[in-house]
């Protein structure tokens, strides 16, 4: 169960994320926001995986 403080922090992160445009193939900004939010929430390790989409020759 989340504490009230943690619930508010998670809700604020979710609200921030839905405001960031993140069309398919253009998720870099939202991925960075997720990583930063997780770091603020105290996660020990965060990372953004590199993904090559079909038809693409370089990582996002």
Image (cartoon, rainbow, N blue to C red):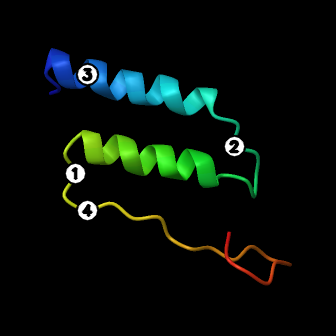
Residue 43 coordinates in the image, percent (x, y): 22, 51
Mark 1: give few (<14), some (14-19) or many (20+) Cα within 10 Å.
few
Q: Is residue 56 left or right of residue 40?
A: right
Q: Residue at x 15, y 27 (%)?
A: 1
Q: Do residues under tags 3 and 1 come within 8 Å of each other at their CB atoms?
A: no
User: SS at mark 2?
Assistant: loop
- Residue identified by numbered label 2: 22
Q: Quadrant of the C terminus?
A: bottom right
Q: Do residues under tags 2 and 1 come within 8 Å of each other at their CB atoms?
A: no
- Residue identified by numbered label 3: 7
Mark 2: give few (<14), some (14-19) or many (20+) Cα within 10 Å.
some
| Viewer-side label of 2, 3 | 2
Residue 23 coordinates in the image, percent (x, y): 76, 45
Q: Do residues under tags 2 and 3 come within 8 Å of each other at their CB atoms?
A: no
Q: What whole-number distance in Å separates the C-alpha atoms at marks 4 and 3?
A: 21 Å
User: SS at mark 4?
Assistant: loop
* Badge 2 or badge 3: first in the primary sequence: 3
Q: Do residues under tags 4 and 1 come within 8 Å of each other at their CB atoms?
A: yes
User: SS at mark 1?
Assistant: loop
Q: Residue at x 46, y 29 (%)?
A: 14
Q: Do residues under tags 4 and 3 come within 8 Å of each other at their CB atoms?
A: no
Q: What whole-number distance in Å separates the C-alpha atoms at marks 2 and 1?
A: 23 Å
The quadrant where residue 42 appears? top left
Q: What whole-number distance in Å separates the C-alpha atoms at marks 2 and 3?
A: 24 Å
Q: Relative to 22, is 24 above or below?
A: below
The quadrant where residue 22 appears? top right
Give the numbered dot on residue 43.
Answer: 1
Q: Residue at x 74, y 73 (%)?
A: 53
């Amino acid at each position: 169960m989340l504490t009230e403080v943690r619930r508010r922090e998670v809700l604020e992160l979710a609200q921030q994320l839905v405001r960031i445009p993140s069309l398919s193939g253009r998720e870099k900004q939202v991925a960075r926001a997720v990583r930063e939010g997780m770091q603020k929430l105290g996660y020990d390790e965060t990372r953004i995986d590199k993904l090559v989409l079909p038809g693409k020759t370089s990582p996002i």
